[in-house]
Amino acid sequence: MTTDSRGLPDAETLAEPFGARLHRAMNTRGQLCVGIDPHASLLASWGLADDVDGLERFTMTVVEALGATTAVFKPQSAFFERFGSRGIAVLEKAVAEARERGALVLMDAKRGDIGSTMAAYAATYLDPGSPLFSDAVTVSPYLGFGALRPALDAAALAGAGVFVLALTSNPEGAQVQRATAADGRSVAQTVLDAIAAENVGARPLGSVGAVVGATLSAAAADLAVNGPLLAPGIGAQGATPADLPALFGPVLANVLPSVSRDVLRHGPDPVALRAAARRYTEEITAAVAGRA
Ligand SMILES: O=C(O)c1cc(=O)[nH]c(=O)n1[C@@H]1O[C@H](COP(=O)(O)O)[C@@H](O)[C@H]1O
C-alpha cells in the first residue's frame, strides 16, 4: 500500500476496498493478525515503566519489529486510552508507523451506539482526515445492526472495513449471542446474515467482517459471510491454529486469526518477536492448507 506524508493511505489506495486490500495482504504476508495490547503486566515483563514512555517504547518496538512482515496489526484502543491524550497520541503514531511499513491497521475499539453517535465514531476511525483513521475498526452490534449504518457507509466511502462482533471468544458471550431472536435464528446468526447482506457481490472478499472467537468448540452458525472472519482467542485464551479447520471449515481461507499476548510476551527482543510471529504464521498456513 502507498501512503502520503502523514502515513495515511493515498487516494489511489482508498479507491480499493478494504476486503481486496486485506485479501492481498493475507496472501502475501500470511493470515496472522498481531494484536497490540500493552497490558501493564507486559510492560513490566519487558522492563518498562507503566507510563506513557513505556507505552510508546513497547508499541514502537512491536511495530518496528513486525511492521514489514505482518498483514494486520490490531491495536486495542483501551490500553492507550488509559493514559489519556498522551496515550492516544502514541496510538496515532502507531497507526501511521504501521501503515508506513505496509501493514494494515484494524483498530480494536468495539464501538457501538445509537446511529447519530455512531456517526461520530465513524468520523473518528473511518474518515481519512482523522488522525485515528484506520484500515478497519471493530464494532458492537448490540444496539441493533442497523445502528451501525453510519460506520458501514463511512467505511465503504473510504475503502475501509468494519468488523462486527458475532460470536466472541469469551464464555460470557453465549448468553447474548446464542439467544434466540424473534424469528427463530440465534442473535449471532442475525448478525452474520446482516454482514453477508453487506458483502453481496464483493470480490475477492467483502469489506465487512465478523468476529468469531477461535476458542469456540463449534460455530453452530452459517459463517459464509463473504467477508473476513477475525478469530481472536489463540494463545493466551487457549485456542491454537490447529483448532481453526474444524471451526471454520469451508471459509478457512477468509479467517484472520489474531494473537496478542502470546506474541507480545516474547519481547522486547525484536528477533524473538519476529520468531514468535513467524511460528504462528507458519502454523496458520499449515492449518489452512490441511496440514495441521
Ligand atoms: O474484537 C476482538 O479483537 C476480540 C473479540 C473477541 O471475541 N475476543 C477477544 O479476545 N478480542 C480481543 O482480542 C485480543 C485477545 O488478546 P490475547 O488473548 O492476548 O491474544 C484482545 O485485544 C481482545 O480484546
Image (cartoon, rainbow, N blue to C red):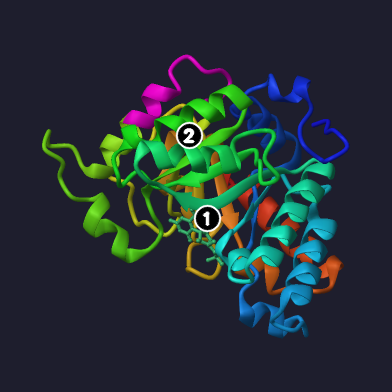
Task: Report whether 247 appears left or right of 208.
Answer: left
The correct choice, above or below, for 100 with respect to 226 in the image is below
Give the structural element (helix, strand or loop) at label 2: helix
In the rendered structure, does residue 195 fall within the stretch colored magenta? yes
Going from the N terminus, do you reach mark 1 or mark 2 first? 2
Report if residue 5 lies within the magenta region. no
Q: Does 149 sit above or below residue 6? A: above
1 left or right of 233?
right
Separation (CA) of disc 1 from disc 2: 34 Å
Q: Residues within 10 Å of mark 2 (few under 14, many from 20)?
A: many
Question: In the image, is residue 95 above or below residue 9?
Answer: below
Name the magenta segment's main secondary structure. Answer: loop
Q: Amino acid at mark 1?
A: Ala
| Residue 291 x %, y % | 59, 47
Can you tell me whether the CB of the residue at mark 1 lies under 8 Å from the nearest atom of ligand 1?
no
| Residue at image mark 1 | 242
Residue indicated by mark 2 = 151
Mark 1 nearby-residue class (10 Å; few <14, some 14–19, many ≥20): some
Read off the magenta span. Answer: 194-206
Q: How many marks?
A: 2
Q: Nearer the viewer, residue 117 or 245?
A: 117
What residue appears at the point 12 percent right and 37 percent down from the top-left corner? 184
